Image: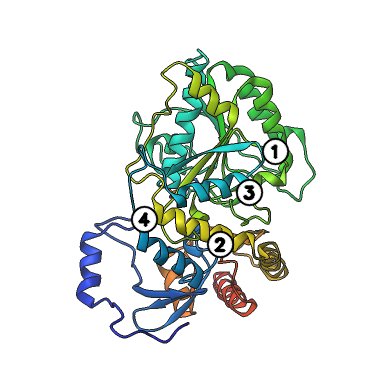
Amino acid sequence: MQEPVQHRPSLTDADLQFDRDHIWHPYTSLADPLPSYPIVAAAGCELELADGRRLVDGMASWWAAIHGYNHAYLNAAATEQLQHMSHVMFGGITHPPAVALARQLVAITPASLDAVFFADSGSVAVEVAIKMAIQYWVSLDKPQKNRLVTIKRGYHGDTFAAMSVCDPVNGMHGLFQGAVRPQLFADAPELTPEQDWQQQDIASLTQLLEQQHQQIAALILEPIVQGAGGMRFYHPEYLRQARRLCDHYQVLLIADEIATGFGRTGRLFACQHADIEPDIMCLGKALTGGYMTLAAVMTQRHVANTIGQGNGGGALMHGPTFMGNPLACAVANASLALLTHQPWQLRVHSIEQQLRARLLGFNRYASVADARVLGAIGVVEMQRPVNVAALQKRFVEAGVWIRPFGKLIYIMPPYVISRQQLERLLDAIEMVVSDTD
Ligand SMILES: *Cc1c(COP(=O)(O)O)cnc(C)c1O
């Protein structure tokens, strides 16, 4: 880390009290908030607390900071773009960062995806993808095909259409009953990538599509890794067959690669584990290397053309204020250049090897239900839900940043993490799983 700069912003006790009293954090109560730790700087694979302690980061800020924090090349891209313009409206205007980014995305995503819609967050990208799918069928005079099918245990974001395809239990549909559109849910895949394929695993999805395809616009799923819905890994054959079923029953396939995109699973996109190409793909999270919010929806030409020539005037009816934000696009361009010009496969692979060598062994502890690894993702599923606040405190005391949820203690560090730093994350996880026995 660099030397501390003078006048580094800090947080007083009064600031922290104000935070507790007035600011919502993700999925917390304002009446009885979980503690928030004051972070004043971050660099490489470390977060710096206000008191100067440094924590090894195991979360990449929720899949996003793949190159680590405060990266000179990404900083330079943002600074450079600031000299030209930080934002300009995208209606009736285009600009170099958006065109350059769209070119890169068309080049690196599966070959058939060649149209780009820039959205402002992952959830909005999912909304747009769903809207595209529904508008596609309206354009083809089949407005009755307007429902979504998905698989249980999924997570697709927190806005309403996205929430409607999240797992009905984890996704808190009960809380918003009547406000969330009822969709169709197939059983979650049970077979892991290591197990032998059995046709039974996709029977539930097959049956739903067979019986209800006339009212289904699209199948939406997270390829290979179900993230926030339970950190589950499933068999690539499931995905291959899902693609075939969609073709057979005339249903679009939406791959939500917001978490899995940009190398996290060991392939640039998780769809590539099954060699399939979705009709629509959502990207987000790591798109800007974790610098700022930006998402993209990629589609095949036939989807874009059908919407463009169909009923309803041909315009795709979406257009956020900050669409294609130049500053975010410039940083995303730099992040993709870093990714594609560096040996990310080797880094992800070596993280995977190190995780496999040690984390899989945590299966021996009685407190652990299942330890699993895929790419640069390590998951320890405990027998019982963890006490998030207590565990978080122990992790911070051990010098690491790991944020558990439910029964899950999991890490997906920046790809630049060193062997020693990763060992520290694993030491900390072993400390808590071994003594909760
Ligand atoms: C995080 C996530 C989203 C939502 O993205 P936001 O940027 O948080 O709105 C959607 N789908 C998946 C798979 C995600 O992991």
Instruction: Determine if residue 127 is in view.
Output: yes
In the image shown, does 308 or 209 lie closer to the viewer? 308
Of the image marks 1 and 3, the number of the one nearer the N terminus = 3
Instruction: Determine if residue 382 is in view.
Output: no
Horizontal and vertical percent for residue 350?
70, 68
Residue type pointed to by label 2: Tyr
* Residues at marks 2 and 4, CA–CA distance in whole angstroms: 17 Å
Q: Which residue is mark 1?
A: 276
Marks 2 and 3 in Cβ contact (< 8 Å): no
Residue type pointed to by label 4: Pro
Q: Secondary structure at mark 2?
A: strand
Of the image marks 2 and 4, the number of the one nearer the N terminus = 4
Mark 2 against mark 1, which lies toward the viewer?
1
Left/right of residue 255 with respect to residue 6 in the rendered view: right
* Residues at marks 2 and 1, CA–CA distance in whole angstroms: 28 Å
Q: Dot 3: within a 10 Å radius of its alpha carbon, few (fewer than 14), some, or many (20 or more) residues?
A: some
* Residues at marks 1 and 4, CA–CA distance in whole angstroms: 34 Å
Residue 26 badge = 4
